[in-house]
């Protein structure tokens, strides 16, 4: 029973990863088209902000490709060298993505600053704003698509992609406004917007770096542990939760918990309570794997008396 349930949980998680891959594939296609369009139009219509936005979308292409590769690796079955599976391939892919974002962001920022001090500002053609506005609309639709898909598969990674889609949509809208402003005389506005886009890319890269390193170093937020503990204590026969720890394997949560029960509890009753805890955490918090240690409360009481 327990092994069948664990296998079902694993299959469910693999199916979720496959659905998340679909969102990454759609993002790759959309961003490739938008990046190419912005590069070409930005070059011929002299818009540095549109070109910078195109580079921003190119980093999203590279990010999506890296994430897709990480997702495909993550769902590979466990082997003798990876007994816990390959789930950490996803945060590793995110870490690589953060380096790409930081490199591109610093390059755009450096070029925009040099262009300003070298007085190489050129008034862009206002037609370039049309491409930026269309891009903003398309990216907003992509944001809604990925957000709905992320909710259906309960994927934090895809939710992050959706947030990035929304940020890119707003960036394209701001780029359109900057191009229009530059075309009516505020030439510096186009180059300034390129710098803003660069800062957005750098900030996103830093955020992705922090999240991926936090996951890879087995970091876990205390507030989630507190929620798990409170929920476990609602079960009858659980007298105390003496310790609880958790770690992330990719998008999957693994929990180790030690509970105190009546020392006269039978082995069967101890087994049943572990099953209930595993099901509770999976149903309520989507915890993929829970390792429950059952200890008699009388041993703890005896230990406390000995310490006194």
Image (spheres, rainbow, N blue to C red):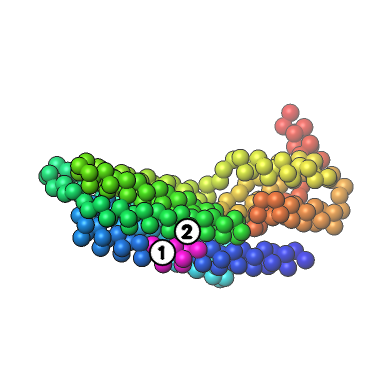
Q: Nearer the viewer, residue 186 or 142?
A: 186
| Apparent side of residue 221 relative to residue 291 in the rendered image (left or right) | left
Q: Is residue 270 visible?
A: yes
Tell me the SS state at disc 1: helix
Residue at the spot of label 2 = 142
Front one among 169 and 91: 169
Q: Residue 270: x, y in percent?
A: 81, 53
Residue 25 in the magenta stretch? The answer is yes
Establish if 156 lies above or below 231: below
Give the residue drawn at x 74%, y 45%. Answer: 232
Quarter of the picture containing the N terminus is bottom right
Nearer to me, 285 or 160: 160
Residue reaching furthest to the left: 118
Q: Image quarter for residue 43?
A: bottom left
Cβ–Cβ below 8 Å for labels 1 and 2?
Answer: yes
Observer-nearest of 128 and 256: 128
Q: CA distance from mark 1 to mark 2?
A: 8 Å
By secondary structure, the bulk of the magenta-drawn segment is best described as helix
Of helix, strand and loop, which one carries label 2? helix
- Which residue does the image show at 30% across and 59% down from the upper left? 38
Q: Residue at x 54, y 70 (%)?
A: 76
In the rendered image, which residue does mark 1 sit on?
Answer: 30
Which region is colored magenta? 23-32
> The C terminus appears in which quarter of the rendering?
top right
- Residue 100: in magenta span: no
What residue is rendered at 65% in x and 54% in y? 287
Mark 1 closeness class: few <14, some 14–19, many ≥20 residues within 10 Å: some
Which of the two labelled residues, at mark 1 and mark 2, occupies the earlier sequence position? 1
């Amino acid at each position: 029973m327990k092994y069948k349930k664990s296998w079902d949980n694993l299959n469910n998680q693999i199916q979720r990863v496959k659905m998340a891959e679909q969102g990454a594939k759609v993002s790759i296609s959309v961003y490739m088209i938008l990046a190419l369009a912005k590069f070409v139009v930005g070059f011929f219509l002299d818009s540095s902000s549109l070109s910078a936005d195109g580079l921003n979308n190119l980093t999203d292409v590279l990010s999506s490709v890296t994430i897709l590769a990480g997702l495909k690796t993550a769902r590979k079955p466990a082997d003798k060298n990876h007994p816990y599976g390959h789930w950490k391939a996803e945060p590793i892919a995110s870490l690589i993505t953060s380096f790409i974002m930081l490199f591109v962001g610093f390059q755009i920022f450096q070029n925009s600053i040099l262009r300003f001090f070298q007085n190489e500002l050129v008034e862009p053609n206002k037609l370039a704003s049309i491409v930026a506005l269309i891009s903003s609309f398309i990216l907003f639709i992509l944001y809604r698509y990925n957000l709905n898909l992320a909710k259906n598969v309960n994927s934090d990674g895809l939710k992050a992609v959706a947030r990035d889609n929304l940020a890119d949509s707003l960036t394209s809208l701001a780029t359109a406004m900057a191009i229009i402003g530059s075309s009516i005389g505020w030439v510096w506005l186009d180059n300034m917007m390129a710098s803003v886009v660069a800062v957005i890319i750098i900030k996103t890269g830093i955020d992705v770096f922090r999240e991926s390193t936090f996951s890879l170093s087995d970091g876990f937020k205390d507030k989630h542990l507190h929620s798990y503990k409170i929920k476990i204590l609602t079960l009858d026969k659980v007298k105390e939760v003496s310790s609880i720890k958790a770690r992330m394997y990719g998008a999957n949560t693994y929990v180790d918990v030690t509970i105190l029960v009546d020392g006269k509890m039978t082995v069967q009753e101890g087994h049943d309570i572990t099953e209930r805890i595993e099901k509770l955490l999976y149903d309520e918090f989507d915890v993929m794997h829970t390792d429950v240690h059952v200890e008699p409360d009388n041993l703890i009481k005896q230990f406390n008396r000995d310490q006194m």
